[in-house]
Amino acid sequence: MTQDLDLSNFWMPFTANRQYKAAPRLLVSAKGMYYTSHNGRQILDGTGGLWCVNAGHCRDEIVAAIQHAAATLDFAPTFQMGHPLVFEAATKLAEITPAGMDRIFFTNSGSEAVDTALKIALAYHRARGEGQRNRFIGRERGYHGVGFGGISVGGIATNRKAFSGALLPGVDHLQHTHNLEHNAFSRGQPAWGAHLADELERLVMLHDASTIAAVIVEPMAGSTGVLIPPQGYLERLRAICDKHGLVLIFDEVISGFGRLGSAFAAQKFNVMPDIMTLAKAVNNASVPMGAVAVRRAIHDTVIDAGPAGAIEMFHGYTYSGHALAAAAACATLDLYKREGTFAQAAAMSPAFEDAAHSLKGTRHVIDVRNLGLVAGVELAPREGKPGTRAYEAFIKCYEKGVLVRVTGDILAISPPLIVDAAQIARIFGTVGEVLGTVE
């Protein structure tokens, strides 16, 4: 297949294009826990696609819902119009979001969800008569997508530096929470680090609370290598935001929909934000879709601020609540409920944790961290060649039929939530075997 396929036209995202196209890896079909490669090999999916296929691949119910929608209503606008599926999807989603966070704005990706959340925070303060609150606080090593808003509040240097002259002004960052000296090989939330949230008080003193609109963090940072929040850290952030009237935004694009054993990380940690950004597993990644869940009080403040008959917020996307995506979301949310997917993930978490930490003492491994059905295995970098050791391990795992994700010198593992004990053992067993062969 690869011999007849022209690879030159597709400019691949977040990929070393020349390296990949010299030795391409193509996935041509998927079912359940497995991909099939272009040469007919079965690949155990240890990454849930890209943190997003929580229910397993090509589930019949979701496929049927998309097919029916495509044959019935291919597109309907949601500007001054609507269609039943988008309202049904919002209602089903609001049934599992934290209490009171039941106003849903649909987007097409996590990146769009983040930019939307930032706009909602600004609109909320303006509606309250505090339009001078226009500063945002993000966090180092945070990933909030690739829109200009998202990379501005994000904290990944490589994502920011090429576009630094065009980022949002008035953005500051908390320090990240990752600390190998204190927290290496923690099981679940590390004990050290809650005090790092107090950095927000310093930023409030520096900028004055009256200028700050919102703080945005991932409750569990995924894309920069699985950074688990220290015990008490998120609680402190919530308290400081309450003290100074700051909107707290949780980016739950990765942590949502059962990944940590609860519907959302907010419920797992019992810390309720004001706004949540969602995407990925909202419809099992079958059709591009994102969403923003908003506290009803914030929504009502914005809606009620303008005169009757006027558009309350000048924002949206042509494909907001697209019919096919909404149909997939309805089917996915029904599937999660019917099969108890989130509880299933919670039940498998202890075995997953034990398997992950069995890698302690394995060659090159300097840390293992985990929560729910996600783990990060951090490797000692090669001198002068950061990232190359983990990338080599990623390739060798794929060659042995297991897909993991590589980010820097960290292997991230986040299988579909339907994973069983034997598959967990195979994923981590393969990682351990490969690391024994990597120099």
Image (cartoon, rainbow, N blue to C red):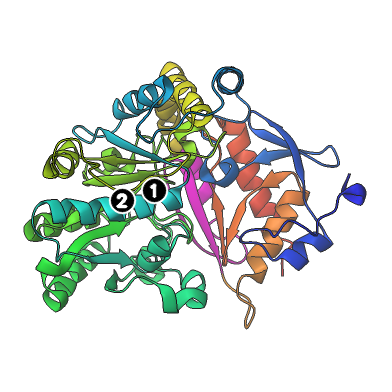
Q: Is residue 351 magenta?
A: yes
Tell me if 428 is positioned left or right of 254 in this view: right
Residue 363, given in percent of the width and then of the height, sits at 62, 64
Q: Is residue 176 above or below residue 300?
A: below
Disc 1 to disc 2, C-alpha distance: 6 Å
**Residue at the extreme front:** 309
- Which residue is at the front of the view, 385 or 11? 11
User: Does the magenta segment cover residue 236?
Assistant: no
| Rendered image quadrant of residue 199 | bottom left
Taking depth in this image into account, of 150 and 314 the one nearest to the observer is 314
Spot occupied by residue 9 in the image (x, y as percentages of width and height): 77, 57
Residue nearest the observer in this picture, 371 or 214: 214
Residue 206 makes an appearance in the image: yes
Query: Which residue is the extreme one toward the right?
Result: 3
Q: Which residues are magenta?
A: 350-379
> In the rendered image, is residue 142 in sight?
no
Marking on residue 113: 1
Q: The N terminus appears in which quarter of the rendering?
A: top right
Q: Quadrant of residue 423?
A: top right
Q: Which residue is mark 2?
A: 117
Relative horizontal placement of residue 422, taking residue 321 as reference (left or right): right
In the structure shown, which secondary structural element does the residue marked by tag 1 occupy? Answer: helix
